Image (tube, rainbow, N blue to C red):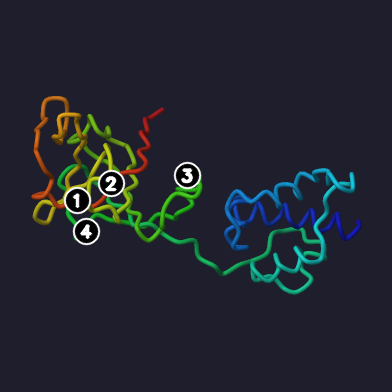
Amino acid sequence: MSVSQIRWSNLNLLIAKFGSIANINEKLERTRNNSLLYQLKNKSINSTSGKKRNIGNKIAREIEAKLGLDDGWMDIEHADPPETTEEKPKIKFFAGGDGIREDGKDSYDMYSVFMEPLGNYKNENDIVGFVIQNATIKDIAPMGSVILVDTSVHTFNGDGIYLFKISDQLVWRQVSFSLDGVFSIKKDATDSQVYQSLENFTIAGKAFYVWKGSPL
């Protein structure tokens, strides 16, 4: 097997290891949608030379350095992806519905790989997840749903599902701003209130993803 073929094979091992080319791009300090590795993986034709693109020395050494691999790792055949001691970051998840307490009594960790389908979503440190385990907010998110919240949001920034802090509890509300210049805050279809301002409310975050699971 030629060095070019070995490097191509190793690139595929790394993609399997890190989950996607987008994740490797982040490690290489590139944008997640940078096209170079996609072209190398797919052996795209170079429009100038008319030949298939190969992984050159420069990119091979960059991959090794940025991913913490041994020098020359890309040039040696490997049966398995490289071992790594790097821990996947975790996101704090809470279980409950409306009236969740902030003390973390019913919280647990979940690996952020759960959020991989979202791509370049948010700053991971600002993310908190909620697993809805009762029917108190069924019109917003039925029981079994997972809500991901950006806790860096503390002011209204558009219609959506917001997390409000009331005393030591967190509650969910659907908030919208009308053309009449008023805010509509809903818990469900029968509980809707109108306010001129949100000044007296403490916003703890805004949902940016709701996964509505259902039993099979």
Which comes before the other along the chain, label 4 or label 1?
A: 4
At horizontal 41% and vertical 57% (from top left) the residue drawn is 123
Local secondary structure at mark 4: loop
Query: For mark 2, what is the residue?
Result: 206
Pointers 2 and 1 in contact (C-beta within 8 Å): yes
Which comes before the other along the chain, label 2 or label 4?
A: 4
Local secondary structure at mark 1: strand
Q: Nearer the viewer, residue 138 or 58?
A: 58
Q: Nearer the viewer, residue 156 or 27?
A: 156
Q: Nearer the viewer, residue 69 or 78?
A: 69
Quadrant housing the C terminus = top left
**How far is mark 4 from mark 1, CA to CA?**
21 Å
Pointers 4 and 1 in contact (C-beta within 8 Å): no
At horizontal 9% and vertical 33% (from top left) the residue drawn is 194
**Residue 167: horizontal and vertical position, in percent?**
8, 55
Which comes before the other along the chain, label 2 or label 3?
A: 3
